[in-house]
Image: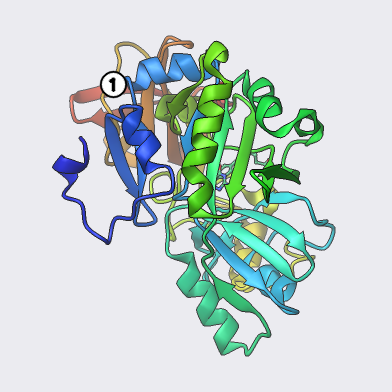
Amino acid sequence: MNLAAMSPTHRTRRTPFTDGVEGAGVSAYTVYNRMLLPAAFESPEADYRHLKTHVQVWDVSCERQVELRGPDAGRLMQLLTPRDLRGMLPGQCYYVPVVDETGGMLNDPVALKIAEDHWWISIADSDLLLWVKGIAWAMRLDVLVSEPDVSPLAVQGPKADALMARVFGDGISAVRFFRFGWFEFQDTWMIIARSGYSKQGGFEIYVPDTALGMPLWNALMEAGTDLQVRAGCPNYIERTEGGLLSFGSDMTAENTPFECGLGKFCHMNAAITCIGRDALLRVERDGPTRQIRPIEIPGDPVGRCAHHWPLMADGEKVGRVSSAAYSPDFKTNVGIGMVRMTHWKPGTRLTVETPEGAREAIVKAAFWA
Ligand code: THG
C-alpha cells in the first residue's frame, strides 16, 4: 500500500521524515496516533534479516510526546502511573503503565524525566493527551500539557553505535540503556536515548524541530553507506520474538498491567497517588486470572494475525493470540497470547483457531529473544 492507496488527508499526519521514507521505497504504512508509520520496506522477512545484521533508521515520529511543564509536572506524572517515580533522576527513561480509574491500561509509554518540572511521555497508540489534559485541568495543577514538535527517529541494529558515533561523536557510546544525553546536530541540541522498539540495541533521537528532520535523515544515510544503513521500521517478526507488547493489539483498557506482565512496574505501596490504585490493589492481592504468555505455533508459517485468534482447550475458549509470525531464526511461529490461569502453565498444549484453520499452540516459559 502507498499513499495513493491510502487516500491522503490532513487527519493522517505526515512526519518530518516522510520524504525520506518515500524516497527509500516504503511498501506498507500503518496509522499510529493519527500519523503515518512505515510497516515494511523490502519485505518483513528481508527487513528482519537486515535489522539483525546491520543498522536501520526508523521514522517513529508517531511515538508522539505528551509534554508536562511546570511545578506540578512530577505530581501529575505520578497520578498517571503505578510505577514508583521517586528514585527517577533527570536523564532517565522509564517504561510506565498508564492506567484508568479501574486499573485498565490506557497506554504503555516511555517516560523521560528531563528536569523536575519537565517530562515527556512518549506514547503508544491511544489519545493519552486528552486524558492528561483533563486530569491537569480538573485537579487545578500548575502544569502545561502539550504535544511539542518532537519526533523520535530510531537507529536500531548491531551497527547502531558505529553509525551514531559518526554523526554525534564518540560520547554516544557512554549513554547507558534507558538513559539519555544531550547531543548537537547543526547547532541544535537534542535528546538521544539508548532505547527503541527492538531487541537489537540502538538509540532514539528526539528530533526537536520538523525542519531538522530531513537534514538529519540524510546525514545518517550518508554516514552509514559502508555500514549498509537502510530505512527500516519496527519489525513485527522481531518484536514478537522478543515479546515487545503493542498497545491496542496485545492489550487494551480491558487489561490491567498485571495481566500484561507489567506487575513489576506496579509499586502499589509507593505510588499511592496513582489513579486506579484501589482497583490495582485488588488485582495485586488476588492475582490476575489471565496473563500475557509466549505462544508457539509449530509447523508451517501462519498468516498475519490482524485480528485476535481464539485459543481453545476441549472446545472452550481459554484465551487468544494477538500477534504471531513465522520466525526465520527460530524456525517456528512465535506468538503473543493472553491465556486464562487454568491453562497458562508452560508446556500446556492448546488449539488456536487461525483464519486458515485450527493449529496446535504451546504455552512457552519465555519469549525467544
Ligand atoms: N520508544 C519510545 N516511545 C514509544 C515506544 C518506544 N512509544 C510507543 C511504544 N514504543 C511504547 N511501548 C513500549 C514497549 C516496550 C518498550 C518500550 C516501549 C521496551 N521494553 C523493553 C523490554 O521489554 O525489553 C525494556 C523495558 C524495561 O525493562 O524498562 O523498550 O519503543 N520512545
Q: Nearer the viewer, residue 367 or 247?
A: 247
**Residue at position x 73%, y 75% from top?**
75
How is the model colour-coded? rainbow
Q: In the image, is 302 to the left or to the right of 109?
A: left
Q: In the image, is 117 to the left or to the right of 108?
A: right
- Vertical arrangement, residue 220 with respect to residue 85, above or below: above
At label 1, which amino acid type do we have?
Val
Q: Nearer the viewer, residue 48 or 173?
A: 173
Which class describes the residues within 10 Å of circle 1: few (<14), some (14-19), or many (20+)?
A: some
Mark 1 close to ligand 1, CB under 8 Å: no
- Vertical arrangement, residue 306 with respect to residue 105, above or below: above
Q: Residue 94: where, in percent of width, then height?
A: 69, 51
**Residue at position x 52%, y 16% from top?**
225
Q: Residue 315: where, in percent of width, then height?
A: 26, 35
Q: Residue 68: where, in percent of width, then height?
A: 64, 70
Q: Quadrant of the N terminus?
A: top left
Which of the 4 quarters of the picture holds residue 40? top left
- Vertical arrangement, residue 224 with respect to residue 21, above or below: above
Q: Is residue 84 visible?
A: no
Q: Helix, strand, or loop for circle 1?
A: loop
Q: Residue 98: where, in percent of width, then height?
A: 57, 61
Q: Quadrant of ligand 1?
A: top right
Q: Is residue 213 visible?
A: yes
Q: In the image, is 161 to the left or to the right of 216?
A: right
Which of the 4 quarters of the picture holds residue 119? bottom right
- Vertical arrangement, residue 312 with respect to residue 359, above or below: below
**Residue at position x 42%, y 54% from top?**
125
Q: Quadrant of the C terminus?
A: top right
Q: Which residue is mark 1?
A: 302
**Residue at position x 26%, y 24% from top?**
303
Q: Across the whole image, how many numbered discs are drawn on residues?
A: 1
Q: Nearer the viewer, residue 1 or 271?
A: 1
